Image (cartoon, rainbow, N blue to C red):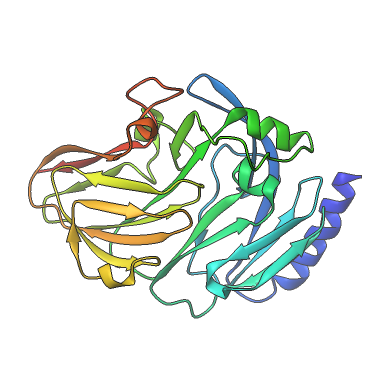
């Protein structure tokens, strides 16, 4: 039955893809292992097959079709159209217009409790394409919550929120160093952009060793655009874009400035740590 729904959804996708520069994202359930924990998960994927990390949207596209491969409906929201949501039933699809976004990093996510808890969230990078552009999707996870929501349960609003795993692009350290989309590799004098989106429920603060970065976008702190900083707060749901102009060689860490967020199930080092690898 699900395969038939996929076929119907794809027929709609193909009919709409006669216009140039369209793509498709699939909402796919599955499971991941992080720091010794197993978690139920939902991801935006490039195909109907589950992938461990959410797919990042390419801002050069004019539109994207989002197909719901989950067993329940999801309410999608994205920051390019504030205040607008789309309810997508199982097997159905919705087309999002991505034209005319300019230099901006936006966020796409499921507004449902199930979607948020299982990590159905990603970013759309547009503009700022004259230099290499890296992406850091931040999130945190309580394995027990993911399994409860995957089984059709709901969260207890009075319960303490104590996540055990913390990730960049759905990976925790040291696996972040194997991710070419987040592990920055450049040379002295070769600038790069980094888009950062906090997809989780906790506010985070990232600290850069070795360099300051220039703030190009800060959706929750617009007054900080133009600042040069080595410590960047990223509130829950916030989108930040920075430019790194490396002036010295070396390998320098970037990490969350919250001790629990740099652990894997309480063991240090782990969690939200990556590196800037700058050649001479």
User: Residue at position x 32%, y 32% from top?
Assistant: 259
User: Residue at position x 11%, y 56% from top?
Assistant: 189
Q: Up-down: is 278 above or below 101?
A: above
User: Residue at position x 51%, y 33% from top?
Assistant: 163
The N terminus lies in quadrant: top right
Callout count: 0
Q: Up-down: is 164 above or below 42?
A: above
The C terminus lies in quadrant: top left
In the image, 10 versus 83, the foreground residue is 83
Residue lying at the far bottom in this picture: please name it.
100
User: Does 280 sit left or right of 83 as displayed?
Assistant: left
User: Residue at position x 48%, y 69% from top?
Assistant: 60
| Residue 74, quarter of the rendered image | bottom right
Q: Up-down: is 236 above or below 154?
A: below
Residue 206 x, y percent position in the rendering: 30, 46
User: Does 268 sit left or right of 64 as displayed?
Assistant: left
In the image, 4 versus 135, the foreground residue is 135
User: In this rendering, does residue 74 appear at all?
Assistant: yes
Residue 146 x, y percent position in the rendering: 65, 34
Residue lying at the far front in this picture: please name it.
158
User: Does 64 sit left or right of 167 as displayed?
Assistant: right
Residue 102 x, y percent position in the rendering: 42, 77
User: In this rendering, does residue 129 appear at all?
Assistant: no
User: Does 229 sit left or right of 30 as displayed?
Assistant: left
């Amino acid at each position: 039955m699900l395969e038939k729904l996929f076929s119907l959804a794809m027929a709609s996708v193909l009919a709409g893809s006669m216009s140039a520069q369209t793509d498709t994202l699939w909402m796919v359930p599955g499971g991941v292992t992080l720091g010794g924990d197993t978690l139920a998960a939902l991801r935006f994927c490039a195909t109907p097959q589950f992938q461990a990390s959410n797919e990042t949207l390419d801002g050069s596209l004019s539109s994207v079709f989002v197909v719901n491969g989950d067993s329940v409906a999801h309410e999608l929201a994205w920051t390019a159209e504030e205040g607008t949501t789309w309810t997508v039933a199982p097997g159905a699809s919705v087309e999002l217009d991505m034209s005319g976004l300019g230099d901006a990093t936006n966020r796409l996510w499921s507004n449902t409790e199930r979607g948020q808890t299982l990590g159905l969230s990603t970013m759309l990078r547009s503009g700022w394409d004259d230099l290499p552009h890296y992406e850091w999707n931040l999130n945190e996870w309580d394995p027990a919550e993911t399994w409860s929501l995957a089984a059709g349960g709901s969260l207890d609003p009075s319960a303490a929120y104590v996540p055990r795993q913390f990730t960049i692009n759905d990976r925790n350290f040291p696996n972040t160093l194997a991710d070419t989309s987040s592990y920055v590799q450049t040379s002295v004098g070769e600038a790069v952009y980094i888009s950062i989106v906090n997809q989780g429920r906790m506010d985070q603060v990232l600290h850069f060793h070795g360099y300051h970065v220039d703030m190009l976008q800060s959706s929750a702190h617009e007054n900080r655009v133009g600042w040069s900083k080595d410590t960047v707060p990223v509130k829950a749901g916030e989108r930040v874009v920075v430019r790194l102009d490396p002036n010295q060689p070396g390998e320098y860490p970037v990490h969350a400035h919250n001790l629990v967020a740099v652990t894997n199930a309480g063991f240090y080092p782990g969690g939200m740590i990556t590196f800037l690898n700058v050649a001479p």
